[in-house]
Image: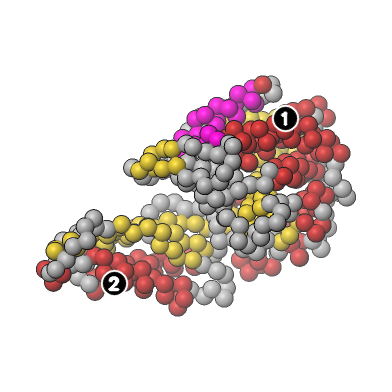
Amino acid sequence: MKRPLSVALRCALSLGVLAALPLAAAAQSGERPEVAAAAAKVKADVVAWRRDFHQHPELSNREERTSAKVAEHLRKLGLKPLTGIARHGVVAIIEGGKPGPKIALRADMDALPVTEQVDLPFASKATATFRGETVGVMHACGHDAHTGILLGIADALVAMKKDLPGQVMLVFQPAEEGAPANEEGGASLMLKDGLFKDFKPEAMFGLHVFSTLPAGQLGVRGGPLMAASDRFSIKIKGRQTHGSTPWGGIDPIVAAADVVGTAQTIISRRTNIAKLPAVVTFGSIKGGIRYNIIPDDVEMTGTIRTFDEGMRQAIFKDLKNVADHVSAAHGAHAEAQVPDQDGNPVTYNDPALTARMLPSLKAVAGDKNVIEMPLVMGAEDFSYYAKEVPAMFFFVGSTEAGVDPSTAPSNHSPKFKLDESSLDIGLRAMLQVTLDYLNAPNAG
């Protein structure tokens, strides 16, 4: 794909501007009747699939049961799914009965190392090993919903494929939350394994249920939508000594505390956040085991979020500089890996494609229920697909009526609770987008 314009222009191409652009003739003034009919037909199945996946969650790169269930249902529909892509990915192509464009639809399948705290009859009781520890496993981000929705869309499209123009690739992706240490996974590995080798879509679409929106609302924006995400790890080596004689060693805990404090100035004093937001967060600190022993070392991990590549690289350099020199000032030594693996790039919605499909979202949810999202500091590896082909990613509100979305348990919370009405509107929105794109006279 031809890369987008400058970041400043990207930000200008938000929905307020895009809505004024000419739209494709395919845009519907209202919801397609075949969308409403198909959604009504598969609604109960989508709920049942989602609940089954919710009760049996699997961590990234471990989605064996989930992918087997997905492939089994696709075969029942008469499709020929390819399995084992990026370990547990499942891909199938629906061949329409009429000539037309090629598109791809994506759902992610993995869960998180989170112990569920929601009282549901289908709540997860699953456990697994994560970073050497036994943890609960939960669909705390809604990937169970995404998988159920895409299975429902598969049912709907297969039922109408005789009159369907073009081809639709269904992508059930593992490891969106990130592969375990020393493993590859997710969207980047799907592409590396040849996802687009023989089928290069002209457009790709994805959705995500989101707690900060009420059920019934959809959110989208043209240009940058979600931040680039990078992980870092810093190990500070000191010298062990008894807590009563700190002068007998080098205290890595004090050095680590100083590194954390000084690192806050990278954003507050060295990064122009008037241009675009950025974040440096320390998420874990581990060092020592006994109250009166100063340990040999301390290990810290965290995340960096940015929307601009220049800012991203500058923060990498600044954080490593802080780790090295602050540690040295304490007589300690830092081993800083910034970043410690390939991160997710910015999730970028093609402005023209977003403008073109905006009426499709409004046809399903209504004008007032489709909002322009602010920049989201969360990240998504859907961004890898968007670097290859024009793409649009949108949010589906998932917080039930009567609960303030600003205070509702967020995605990744052990108390994350999905209003299942979001399954219906998510399915209808994606199906409307699909049919509007495929039936456009100038599609492709």
Task: Give the main secondary structure of the magenta stretch.
Answer: helix
Q: Residue at 66%, 53% (x, y): give it.
A: 399
**Is 241 on the left or on the right of 11, as rendered?**
left
Q: How is the image coloured?
A: secondary structure
Query: Which residue occupies 74% across, 35% down?
Result: 43
Label 2, label 1: how far apart the Cα atoms are: 58 Å
Q: Residues within 10 Å of mark 1 (few under 14, many from 20)?
A: many
Does 316 sit left or right of 29 as displayed? left
For marks 2 and 1 on the same chain, the one whose residue lies earlier in the sequence: 1
Circle 1 — which element? Answer: helix
The amino acid beneath tag 2 is Val
- Provide residue 413's location: percent of width, then percent of height: 52, 52
The residue depicted at 70 percent of the width and 46 percent of the height is 422
Q: Which mark is residue 326?
A: 2
| Magenta span contains residue 61 | yes
Residue 279 lies, in percent from the top left, at 49, 66
Looking at the rendered structure, the secondary structure element under dot 2 is: helix
In this view, 158 is above or below 224: above
* Residue 254 percent across, percent down from the top left: 26, 69
Q: Which of these two is toward me, 240 or 302?
A: 240
In this view, the residue in front, 217 or 33, is 217
- Which one is nearer the viewer's eye here, 151 or 324? 151
Residue numbers of the magenta segment: 55-75
Q: Pick whichever, 275 or 200, lies toward us.
A: 275
Count of marks, rendered view: 2
Residue 155 image label: 1
Residue 179, placed above or below residue 395: above
